[in-house]
């Protein structure tokens, strides 16, 4: 439309110079001709530049051979746009997927706990092979762990790992069990003096950053699993997986048979649930669980398949005087404290234990 308007302006100006004898009008018409011709020239030049960028058959002087002009005009309107080039590297929230979800990594980045080559990371930053990533000040071997996590998420037909490879040989991840002492907090935040990583101490022959699978409150003791494998956490913690947790519970007094039956059937408690960083109170009946008497007069053995916040303590507190005075986890997902002699001890999971929790099948596709 603009081009046609410019052409009409040039034609009108040319006619005016021929028919009008007033000198001022003729000068104005001549200027209009020059403006219109300048616009038309710029428009055509711009079209030629655009065509030369998309067509390799242009001649060196920037003009198309006459036989190609029509085909190029058709191609410009019919050919789909070429896709933009793929961005290099991977986003920071994908690089840590072996140990954290994208949402968790985004939260760590927001809190300034992730650095890339000494610089505090920003959301959306991309990292390349060779970049040094630190989390809580510790170097993360993100290239190896990210590759291992990608391999672990493949289907059996996609993976090339030998089916009979032992989990303890060239394992891409770390799996350990730990006898948590009283007072240790199940957090990986190194700013917390009693954090579980400080209590655990350095792990020999690995620089991987491990994290706990689930949690025990500070006053509780016993078994907790730690791993660098983020792909296995959900399969162990979600309720549909039906992974049981066994506890030795010592109460302030002896529980009656009726109270044991009610605990097993489920009682209504209020717990605090975290959703998208927000705390929300949840009042609901607990799911049926296993409850039986233990060795001591005031000891109960409880087996749960759900994990609400401080659930056992709140369940027992629904009965007057039945408060929990000691809580000790003895088993989780089929793994026990075997091989650990005292609080603070830890050891790598055996091949059988790794099969039990699913690490063997996840990594080898079996």
Image (cartoon, rainbow, N blue to C red):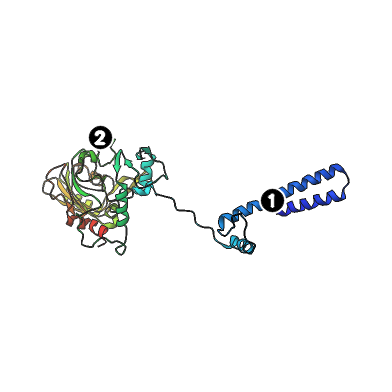
Residue beneath the point at 65% across and 51% down: 45
Determine the secondary structure under disc 1: helix
Is residue 277 rendered to the left or right of residue 244?
A: right
Name the one closer to the observer, 246 or 190: 190
- Residue 107: x and y, percent? 37, 43
Is residue 125 rendered to the left or right of residue 3?
A: left
Mark in the foreground, 2 or 1: 1
Q: Residues within 10 Å of mark 1 (few under 14, many from 20)?
A: few
Asked if labels 1 and 2 touch by Cβ distance under 8 angstroms, the answer is no
Determine the secondary structure under disc 2: loop
Is residue 294 rendered to the left or right of residue 263?
A: left
Name the one closer to the observer, 141 or 293: 141
Q: Quadrant of the C terminus?
A: bottom left
Residue bearing mark 2: 193
Q: Residues within 10 Å of mark 2 (few under 14, many from 20)?
A: few
Sequence-first disc among 2 and 1: 1
Which residue lies most toward the right here?
21
- Residue 203: x and y, percent? 20, 43
- Residue 185: x and y, percent? 24, 40
Q: Which mark is residue 41?
A: 1
- Residue 284 in view, yes or no: no
Q: Quadrant of the N terminus?
A: bottom right
- Residue 99: x and y, percent? 30, 48
Question: Could you give the CA–CA distance between mark 2 and mark 1, rounded to whole angstroms?
Answer: 74 Å
- Residue 339 in view, yes or no: yes
Residue beneath the point at 30% across and 44% down: 140
Residue beneath the point at 24% across and 62% down: 162
Q: State the image quarter where residue 218 is shown.
A: top left
């Amino acid at each position: 439309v603009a081009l046609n308007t410019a052409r009409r302006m040039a034609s009108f100006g040319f006619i005016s110079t021929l028919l009008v004898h007033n000198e001022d009008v003729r000068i104005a018409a001549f200027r209009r001709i020059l403006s219109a011709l300048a616009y038309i020239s710029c428009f055509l030049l711009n079209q030629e530049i655009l065509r030369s960028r998309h067509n390799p058959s242009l001649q060196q002087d920037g003009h198309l051979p006459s036989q190609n002009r029509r085909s190029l005009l058709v191609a410009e309107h019919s050919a789909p746009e070429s896709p933009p080039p793929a961005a290099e590297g991977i986003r920071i929230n994908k690089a840590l997927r072996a140990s954290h979800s994208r949402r968790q990594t985004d939260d760590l980045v927001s809190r300034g706990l992730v650095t890339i080559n000494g610089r505090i990371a920003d959301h959306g930053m991309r990292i390349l092979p060779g970049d040094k990533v630190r989390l809580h000040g510790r170097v993360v071997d993100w290239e190896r762990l990210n590759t291992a996590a990608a391999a672990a998420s493949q289907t059996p037909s996609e993976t090339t790992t030998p089916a009979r490879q032992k989990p303890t040989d060239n394992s891409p991840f770390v799996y350990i069990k730990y006898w948590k002492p009283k007072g240790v907090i199940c957090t990986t935040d190194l700013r917390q003096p009693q954090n579980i990583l400080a209590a655990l101490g350095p792990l020999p022959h690995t620089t991987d950053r491990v994290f706990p699978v689930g949690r025990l409150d500070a006053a509780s003791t016993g078994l907790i699993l730690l791993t660098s494998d983020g792909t296995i956490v959900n399969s162990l913690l979600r309720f549909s997986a039906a992974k049981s947790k066994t506890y030795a519970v010592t109460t302030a007094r002896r529980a009656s048979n009726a109270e044991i039956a009610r605990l097993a059937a489920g009682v209504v408690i209020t717990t605090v649930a975290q959703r998208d960083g927000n705390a929300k109170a949840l009042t609901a009946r607990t799911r049926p669980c296993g409850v039986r008497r233990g060795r001591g007069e005031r000891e109960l053995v409880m087996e749960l398949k759900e994990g609400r916040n401080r659930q056992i303590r709140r369940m027992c507190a629904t009965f007057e005087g039945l408060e929990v005075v000691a809580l000790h986890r003895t088993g989780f997902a089929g793994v026990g404290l075997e091989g650990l002699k005292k609080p603070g001890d830890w050891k790598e999971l055996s091949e059988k234990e790794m099969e039990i929790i699913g690490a063997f099948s996840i990594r080898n596709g079996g």
